[in-house]
Structures are given as C-alpha cells and as structure tokens.
Image (cartoon, rainbow, N blue to C red):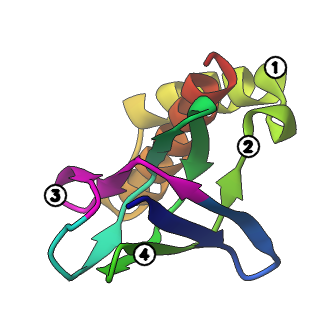
Amino acid sequence: MPLKLVVVTPEKKVVETDTDQVEVPGELGYLGILPGHAPLISLLKTGVLTYKGGGGEKSLALSSGFVEVANDAVSVLADLAEEPAQIDVATAEQDRSRAEEELKTASRETLEEIRTRLELAQARLAVAGK
C-alpha cells in the first residue's frame, strides 16, 4: 500500500501524490518513512525532501516546518518548498557564497540566521542538481 504525500506551504499545495518512500530532513537527522510507519510528529529543518515511486525519485528543497505521519499519510507543512524547476542555480550559488563569507565574521547574534541561509542555498543546489 503506497504512502500519501502532501506538501504544503503557507502559499500553496506543492505536492500531493502517492509514493513508496519519503525521506525528510528531521530536526535530529533525516527520517526515512515507508508504508506502515508508526505515527509521528516532528520538527523539520532546512534540507532536501526526497520521495520515490513508480516514476523514479523526486526532490524538494525545504525550509523549516513540521511533518506528521499517520495511517500511511505523510503531511509536510514547510515555510518554503521548491521543486527543481523553480530554483535559480546562479542565485543559489551566490547565496551560498555570500553566506559562507558572512560566517567568517559572524557574531553570535547572526550566526544561526546565516547558517539557515547557507543550508537553504545548499538544499536548493542539491535539488537543482538531481
């Protein structure tokens, strides 16, 4: 029995599909979800959501959010979810370079915000490269 995957952002529903497997960037590491998975609610961090099915593997760049798993349904609510076609690789490269430079002189107050921008740029580049 397949998993029902739904990914939504505050602006729109990004994905609604049946899939065989989902991997999400959980707060403490990536979580693999297969049919029959135990119920779960978890924080998500910025990273790459991957899902596999009959049509191959697809990926989304995600920013922070939540995931809920129940009754073979995976519901993801993220601040941002981008498909490969939505990602401007040149802009993501610039964002990554800028964040890496800013990390060198970051204060404690700005460190977390810069790391988040860097992680999002890296996720975008990973998704665009697939």
Q: Gap in Å between the C-alphas at discs 3 and 2?
A: 24 Å
Mark 3, residue position: 28
Q: Earlier in the sequence, mark 1 or mark 3?
A: 3
In this rendering, which labeled residue sits more in front, label 1 or label 4?
4
SS class of the residue under badge 3?
loop
| Labels in figure, total | 4
SS class of the residue under badge 1?
helix
In the image, taking residue 73 as reference, residue 122 lies left or right, namely right
**Labelled pair 2, 1 in contact (Cβ < 8 Å):** no
Q: Gap in Å between the C-alphas at discs 1 and 3?
A: 30 Å
Dot 2 crowding, Cα within 10 Å, few <14, some 14–19, many 20+: some
Q: Is residue 129 magenta?
A: no
Q: Earlier in the sequence, mark 3 or mark 4?
A: 3
Q: Quadrant of the C terminus?
A: top right
**Labelled pair 1, 3 in contact (Cβ < 8 Å):** no
Label ID, residue 73: 4
